[in-house]
Amino acid sequence: MSDHLREARDNWIDHFAKQVCLDWAPGTLKFGGRLLAPWVMNDELTLATALSRIAVEDVKAHSPHEVVEQFRAANLLSPSASSDSVLHELVLPVVRSVRRLGAPWDRWWDVGGLHVLLVELWAGRRLEKYSIDTVQEELVVFWQVPKEQIAAILKNTADPFVYLPPDLFQKSRTGIATQLLRGLVKLGRIRLGTYEDITSTRPGLVDRPELAEIVQRIHRRIDLETSLRQFFHDIPTSDEAAIQLDLNAWDAQIRALPEGLSSYEIQLMKELHPDEIYRDRCLRAGRDVFLSWLLEDDSLPSAIGARNQNATVPRWIHDEIITSGARSFHVNVGPHPVWLATAETAVHQAALQGLMMPGVEYGIKIDVRRDEVIIKLVLPLLLGDSGPALELPYSYSLCTVDPAWQLLHLAAVGYVRITTLRLTTDGEPLMIGTIVVILPSKVCVELEKQAIVALRRMVGEDTKQIMWRRVTDGHDREAEAAFHGNETAKSEDLHDELVPTSSHGAPAVEAFRSASLRLARARARHSTAVLNGNLDSTLSHAVEQAVEERQRALEIARADFDIQHRRDERDRAIVEALPDGQAAFVHLFIKNGWLSSVVLWRDEGNARFELLPYSDIEVDRFTAMTAVWSQQSQSHIGQDWYRYLTTLLAASTNLVESFMEVLLQQGIRRLFLSPTPPLDLLPIHAVPIKIDSTMVLRDSFDGVSYMPTARMLTAIKRSDRRRAKCPALVVAHTGNGIPGLDAIRSPLVEAEIVAALHTGARILKEESATPDAVLDAMTDARIVHITSHSLMHPNRWASGLALHGYSAGEATLTTSKILAEADLSNVDLVVLNACRTGTHDSTARTVQTLRGIESAFLARGTRAVISTLWDITALNAMAFSALLHAYLNDGATASTAYRESIAYLRHHRWRSSAHSESDRIAEALLDEVLITWRDHLDRQATTDPLFWAAFKFTGTM
């Protein structure tokens, strides 16, 4: 019987090793490749163990390059094999297989368990030919087995069944136990368990009859002893002694058997709880769901190390951060649960990297709610950090199958690969690397319990549904998730909490608001020094310290469940911020190589979302062209500049028409657009429409406005509005003069035109137009019009408007100064009539809302801003200003005045005699300045038919 059982186990081992080799061995090995040493290639069990070592190194997040070096150091490679060949023909193919399918056995998620099993089986067979000392050394060199585990592995044998005691129903030492057992069976006091009985609670033994035989014998021994206690109280002393002798002999023999088996086989023989069986069924059923963009060679960065310095951020991670905020992002890539974590300060980065330091303590908290589980990773407090400890929350919904299944998978695996990135001051993500965090066993037990309850509620015992529902469930909320992902990402550095309100929020929000204002003040001082060229380390340190304080406050707010998860209230606030049921908010973004849009509108008072992916644009080429176009000199707009712009706008037509069609069917007449970089550099309102070559996007709607985020729209709507005392503040500063009208000091002339259209307007010009004076005067004005020069600076916080002062720093109204000092809750409209006030220098897709000066004005309470996307001529600026303020003076809203002014310029109404009263008033003022202004506009419209599109409206309508 022992020989038969050994043969069955040997057959299983051979088949198992062969299966691993078939699934994982690349073709270069299968067809005579000479990458591995002959002694590895000539034995399938050894080869399978070598392949599993590659797989387990991927679990540890070791880079493929490191694996090659480890294999060479362990003499597992052929001396003639080059490192490059081993990398591309062996290691990377195995890693791809692991990330696609997991491990080639029933427990596909347990790569580490597979490797341990193969090592144990390999050691058992190796000990048949080699000494214990030799095998011990090989375990360390070849498979890097920790020393504390070696003793247990060396007890594995090729034939553990030599220790298997007899079936007590067939034989016992004295025969008395066997006789008694047969009698109990005959009387019906004991039922001999069948093979089916055993495998029903141990499904892993279905194809392991030799292990089932062991379990059967153990059960009969237990049943006999249990029955003796229950039914026999007066057994003759001689029989009792004989039975005890039989049992003792049986026990002495079986004690050595478990040590000869692998730990996996021992686990197989244990009876499973129904929840454990259900767990495994669920995990197997949901195995083959994968995302192709997660399977690329560089999709999962390696562990933190020298190789990761300045490493490229994989596109999917970049996209998740840019379009989804990556705050609670989780996914599984084959067997790997993956989290993203972004470090935005030096302390934050150090805390994340501290997870890798030996002896450093971190925490895992679980917050179980009705419809989700929040896992909070509590980062360690390092020396010098007074706390509180940062917490990174990861949310798993219990309402849909996919996140619940991912939660179960996480609990089963017991580890998570945390991919960490550092966000630079400009918002660009830089790779740090991957940290592997082991979850405490108690945490895994609780997570498994919550996941199983949720899955049983959603699919019951029909686990076959899991595969389909992992793919399909949640699609009805996919658009909502995409919308709010954009909201999170675009709000990273400019939150609606900055907008002045009369009501106070939660303590965490108030702390964040205060920290944000302190940071803005520190940046304002720093920007002044930068512009003056006298920056010192004290100011830089103050900014760094303020960044740390703000980030700590932000992380605490993010970790607050009540703040982050009021979904219904959040959506209701956005819907209420839309002017009416005919308005919609559109996020335009790039993700996974697709240019997409996601829209929100009001449908019977509720939020309605629609996700519209569009894949016809070659995104990389589109982005590159945008970068080239935006960086061309605009002092003289030439044919190349115009050709690039028209090509880019034409390429965006299908994207625009995809959401136009949906919204027009819903009766939407007003749009709020929020484009992700580099789309934000383009005049999306001027994208042509195919149905009529003369039409553009703005022609299909009554109003088209830009807005950084819907949260900003909500915050402005809810802000505490003050009554303005002054109808208009006009600010003018000539600086070095604007080319175009040499004989006219255009900003001053423009200021006079604007002031003439508003009774009681106040003018600040030249020496009186200092940043401090302008900020102070703004607090009383309803409309603010600034005509000057803009300053685009590599440090975006130092960008701003050039006014009066005795140094560059003193003269510039910077973005940071606006954020630090302005209170504009009385201002309905700010007109920034200078070059490029609605754009920025960077074409990088960064995590930031604040890229133009306009966003700072909105953040401090302004309802709307009119700015420019590229250089404009002095005449263009003057004509637009005259028209705009003529309409405003006639009672038009800011958006209506903007729309009519653009229509005048676009349709060349200066050539027509059919004018509105506002047009005639504006024309009369322009005639007083330059009688030939119409001729100048004619020439400009011919050179650049899109000159009108430079003007951009951002804010509420």
Image: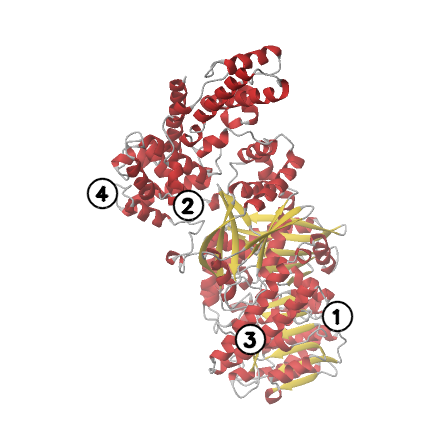
Q: Which residue is mark 1?
A: 502
Numbered label attached to residue 58: 2
The amino acid marked with disc number 1 is Ser
Vertical arrangement, residue 526 with respect to residue 655, above or below: below
Q: Which residue is mark 4?
A: 80
Question: Under tag 2, what secondary structure?
Answer: helix
Question: Under tag 3, what secondary structure?
Answer: helix
Numbered label attached to residue 330: none
Mark 1 nearby-residue class (10 Å; few <14, some 14–19, many ≥20): few
Instruction: State how far apart marks 1 and 2 are (Cα).
Output: 53 Å
On the image, the x and y values in percent for residue 802 come to: 55, 80
Question: Under tag 4, what secondary structure?
Answer: loop
> Does residue 772 appear to the left or right of 346 in the view shown?
right
The amino acid marked with disc number 3 is Arg
> Does residue 163 appear to the left or right of 514 in the view shown?
left
On the image, the x and y values in percent for residue 455 come to: 63, 37
Q: Report whether residue 871 is seen.
A: no
